Image (cartoon, rainbow, N blue to C red):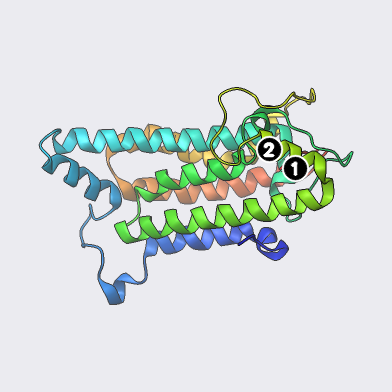
């Protein structure tokens, strides 16, 4: 079930394809799984379902789901930035798998609490985007991204086990793969985080989080989708800066 080196190399393209399919839901042309209309996205459908329970009205239901979307977007952006600050944005964006420059396990920042903060951050981010998708597209994206993240995790862990051997196996026994431990499970190596480069490298995720927080209160999913497209464009601009210099690689 682990991802191949080729899948790892094109992982960003694979994410883009999954999200695009989630938003367009092309299967609806034949299967008609989702209702038509301006509020036929998951946000509107879930809000209507919540209001029908009688616990909250439709306005409060929209607000509650928006708050969840903001929290998912912020959590995803934070986890990815925290990880990239120690891993190095150049390594995060690279198409090849890496070990540390010294050939040893380096665990700092979020990597002391869980092994895959970047992948977990992307998965949390997916829940925010899913609110803007038709229901079938949302389910497809969450499942597909989840499976893709697991495949990438297993692929990297297999690579690191082969490269680092018993040191990495011992690290894996102490640090959970997905659900973070509240307390750090291993001692840090004293690496300094590169926050500026990390924020630049994760521009897209922060732009989405800011868009949900600032524009979401207009209850316009189409406007948020436009913000998403702008965020993708800004991320390419930021990538030109983060790709200029690659920091010493650390633990993925």
Q: Seen in the image, is 63 located left or right of residue 164? A: left
Asked if labels 2 and 1 touch by Cβ distance under 8 angstroms, the answer is yes
Query: In this rendering, is residue 13 above or below 203?
Result: below
Q: Seen in the image, is 250 located left or right of residue 117? A: right
Query: In this rendering, is residue 152 above or below 249?
Result: below
SS type, badge 2: helix
Q: Seen in the image, is 236 located left or right of residue 179? A: right
Which of the 4 quarters of the picture holds residue 81?
Answer: top right
Q: Residue at x 21, y 37 (%)?
A: 61
* Horizontal and vertical percent position of residue 121: 54, 40
Q: Is residue 246 visible?
A: no
* Horizontal and vertical percent position of residue 197: 70, 34
Looking at the rendered image, the quarter that the N terminus falls into is: bottom right
SS type, badge 1: helix
Pointer 2 residue: 173
Q: Is residue 167 visible?
A: yes
Q: Residue furthest bottom?
A: 30
Q: Residue at x 53, y 45 (%)?
A: 122
Q: Residue at x 36, y 65 (%)?
A: 25
Looking at the rendered image, the quarter that the C terminus falls into is: top right
| Nearer to us in this view, 234 or 198 | 198
Which of the 4 quarters of the picture holds residue 84?
Answer: top right
Q: Residue at x 68, y 27 (%)?
A: 109
Q: Please tell me how crowded label 2 is: few (under 14), some (14-19), or many (20+) other residues with Cα within 10 Å.
A: few
Pointer 1 residue: 169
Q: Seen in the image, is 44 located left or right of residue 140? A: left
| Nearer to us in this view, 26 or 244 | 26
Q: How many marks?
A: 2
């Amino acid at each position: 079930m682990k991802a191949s080196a080729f899948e790892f190399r094109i992982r960003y393209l694979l994410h883009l394809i999954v999200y695009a399919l989630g938003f367009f839901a092309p299967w609806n042309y034949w299967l008609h799984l989702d209702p038509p209309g301006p509020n036929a996205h998951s946000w509107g459908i879930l809000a209507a379902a919540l209001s029908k329970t009688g616990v909250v009205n439709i306005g409060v239901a929209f607000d509650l789901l928006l708050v969840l979307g903001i929290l998912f977007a912020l959590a995803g952006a934070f986890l990815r930035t925290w990880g990239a600050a120690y891993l190095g944005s150049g390594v995060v964006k690279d198409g090849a798998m890496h070990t540390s420059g010294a050939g040893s396990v380096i665990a700092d920042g979020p990597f002391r609490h869980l092994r895959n903060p970047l992948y977990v951050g992307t998965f949390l981010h997916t829940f925010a985007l899913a609110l803007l998708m038709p229901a079938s597209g949302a389910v497809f994206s969450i499942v597909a991204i989840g499976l893709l993240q697991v495949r990438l995790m297993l692929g990297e862990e297999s690579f690191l086990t082969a490269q680092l051997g018993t040191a990495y196996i011992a690290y894996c026994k102490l640090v959970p793969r997905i659900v973070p431990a509240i307390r750090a499970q291993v001692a840090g190596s004293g690496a300094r985080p590169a926050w500026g480069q990390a924020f630049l490298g994760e521009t897209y995720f922060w732009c989405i989080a800011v868009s949900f927080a600032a524009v979401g209160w207009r209850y316009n999913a189409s406007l948020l989708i436009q913000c998403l497209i702008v965020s993708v464009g800004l991320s390419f601009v930021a990538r030109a800066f983060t790709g200029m210099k690659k920091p010493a690689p650390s633990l993925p």
